[in-house]
């Protein structure tokens, strides 16, 4: 029988690894995709990660050893990004792993999160984290609820708190025609983001529906954005300009 692990600090459900990630934080990164997400974003690219008790059940030690094989390279080239799914669904495991990787290898550690569960964690949980890639989905509470099936307030609370703690933030915003591209919504969002002193950049990510096949493969899920086009270059430029007008660096 495996040892008891009531707080999940010994083992976790891992969906997959990417060893040469170039889009999830600075430099080249080992990206760890954790299982489990409590949101249900219409545009989700990884609905296959939603189920928490799926994927491979691994110990912190096994996972740290897998990352450690690449550590000499990652230390100079980039670091580790823990993503998902939503990594804070397995915060015990993720926190223990981040501490271990930081202590053993001194890697730069980034956390890619929707932020909604951060309020459950003490400040010290974030000690080994160097950067938070914070996904903001929408600035309007009702539209946020409609888009993600979860409330907005805990996400905004997390953004304010992390910034108060001095945590560097990269904000990520998926631009979806008809959902997140309204000029007035982007104005409100840009105002909110500009009020967070530790934001280093805003990543505007144009929607695409290349994940439709994953939704179709999942029983009981309906992909609502099959007919939604990618945003136009003009819209993308306008949204970037709205952030840039507040002095925010956009990528
Ligand atoms: S938070 Fe991320 S993983 Fe979760 S449903 Fe939304 S896009 Fe998918």
Image (cartoon, rainbow, N blue to C red):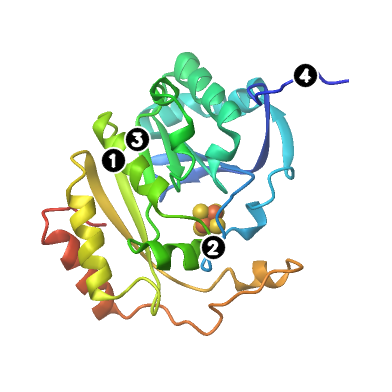
Is 10 on the left or on the right of 103, as rendered? Answer: right
Disc with the residue nearer the chain's start (3 vs 4): 4
Above or below — where is 138 with respect to 125? below
Nearer mark to the viewer, of 1 and 2: 1
Disc with the residue nearer the chain's start (1 vs 3): 3
Disc with the residue nearer the chain's start (1 vs 2): 2
Disc with the residue nearer the chain's start (4 vs 1): 4
The CA span between labels 3 and 2 is 22 Å
Q: Are marks 4 and 2 in contact (CB under 8 Å)?
A: no
The CA span between labels 4 and 1 is 36 Å
**Residue for badge 4:** 4
Is 55 on the left or on the right of 92, as rendered? Answer: right
Q: Residues within 10 Å of mark 1 (few under 14, many from 20)?
A: some
Residue 242, x across and y down, in percent: 17, 66
Nearer mark to the viewer, of 3 and 4: 4
Q: Residues within 10 Å of mark 2 (few under 14, many from 20)?
A: many
Residue beneath the point at 32% across and 61% down: 139
**Residue for badge 2:** 44
Residue 41, x across and y down, in percent: 52, 63
The CA span between labels 1 and 3 is 15 Å
Nearer mark to the viewer, of 1 and 3: 1
The single residue placed furthest to the right in the displayed view is: 1
Asked whether mark 2 lies closer than 8 Å to ligand 1, one says yes
Q: Are marks 3 and 2 in contact (CB under 8 Å)?
A: no
Q: Secondary structure at mark 3?
A: strand
Residue 52, x across and y down, in percent: 68, 44
């Amino acid at each position: 029988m495996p040892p008891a692990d009531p707080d999940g600090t010994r083992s976790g459900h891992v969906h997959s690894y990417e060893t040469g990630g170039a889009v999830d934080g600075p430099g080249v990164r080992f990206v760890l995709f954790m299982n489990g997400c409590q949101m249900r974003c219409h545009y989700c690219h990884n609905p296959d990660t939603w189920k928490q008790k799926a994927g491979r059940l691994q110990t912190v030690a096994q996972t740290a050893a897998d990352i450690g094989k690449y550590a000499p390279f990652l230390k100079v080239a980039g670091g580790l990004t823990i993503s998902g799914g939503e990594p804070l669904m397995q915060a015990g495991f993720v926190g223990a792993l981040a501490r271990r990787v930081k202590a053993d290898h001194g890697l730069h550690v980034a956390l890619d999160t929707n932020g909604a569960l951060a309020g459950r964690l003490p400040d010290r949980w974030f000690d080994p984290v160097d950067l938070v890639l914070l996904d903001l989905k929408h600035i309007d509470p009702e539209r946020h609820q409609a888009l993600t099936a979860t409330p907005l307030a805990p996400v905004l609370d997390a953004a304010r708190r992390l910034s108060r703690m001095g945590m560097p933030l990269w904000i990520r915003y998926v631009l979806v025609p008809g959902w997140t591209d309204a000029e007035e919504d982007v104005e409100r969002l840009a105002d909110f983001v500009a009020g967070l002193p530790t934001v280093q950049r805003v990543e505007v990510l144009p929607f695409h529906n290349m994940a439709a096949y994953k939704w179709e493969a999942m029983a009981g899920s309906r992909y609502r954005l099959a007919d939604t086009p990618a945003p136009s270059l003009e819209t993308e430029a306008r949204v970037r300009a709205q952030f840039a007008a507040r002095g925010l660096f956009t990528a």
